[in-house]
Amino acid sequence: MGKIATAIKEKLTKAFNPSQLEVRDESHKHAGHAGASAHAAEHGSSESHFHVIIRSNAFEDMSRLAKHRAVMEVLAEEMKTIHAFSLDADAG
């Protein structure tokens, strides 16, 4: 797991105490795209595309938008260097 994926996992664990957390680095699927090498040069990492699955009681009674906003707030610093991020967040 790379440094960005590790930071994502650590921050989400601390913020939401999840019962399930998967941080998938899907950057390899985009390695041939035009911006991939530029992204790596600019940010010092080829980590650019992530999919996160998270289940937490902290999301109880939150709308889908509220869950996404909560996660984005926690990951604000990482989002500055991430090109694509998808999220599957639910209570549990």
Image (spheres, grey):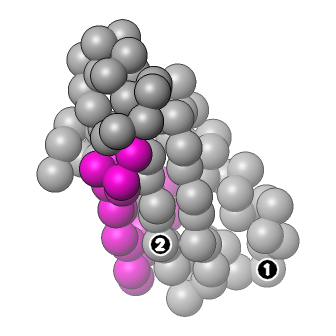
Q: Secondary structure at mark 2?
A: strand
Q: Residue furthest top?
A: 42
Mark 1 highlights which residue?
61
Q: Residue furthest bottom?
A: 92
Nearer the observer, 9 or 59 = 9
How many labels were placed on the picture? 2
Residue appearing at x 58%, y 63% in the figure: 87
C-beta proximity under 8 Å, tags 1 and 2: no
Residue appearing at x 34%, y 39% in the figure: 32
Is residue 16 shown in magenta? yes
Nearer the observer, 2 or 31 = 31
- Going by the numbered disc 1, the residue's amino acid type is Asp
- Going by the numbered disc 2, the residue's amino acid type is Ile
Give coordinates of residue 24: x percent, y percent. Answer: 34, 62
Mark 2 highlights which residue?
53
Give coordinates of residue 91: x percent, y percent. Answer: 62, 83
Q: Is residue 75 left or right of residue 46?
A: right
Q: Residues within 10 Å of mark 1 (few under 14, many from 20)?
A: few
Q: Is residue 27 left or right of residue 92?
A: left
Q: Is residue 22 left or right of residue 77?
A: left
Q: Secondary structure at mark 1?
A: loop
Q: Quick check: 87 above or below 35?
A: below
1 or 2: tag closer to the N-terminus: 2
State the image quarter where residue 44 is shown. Answer: top left
Q: Which residues are magenta?
A: 14-30
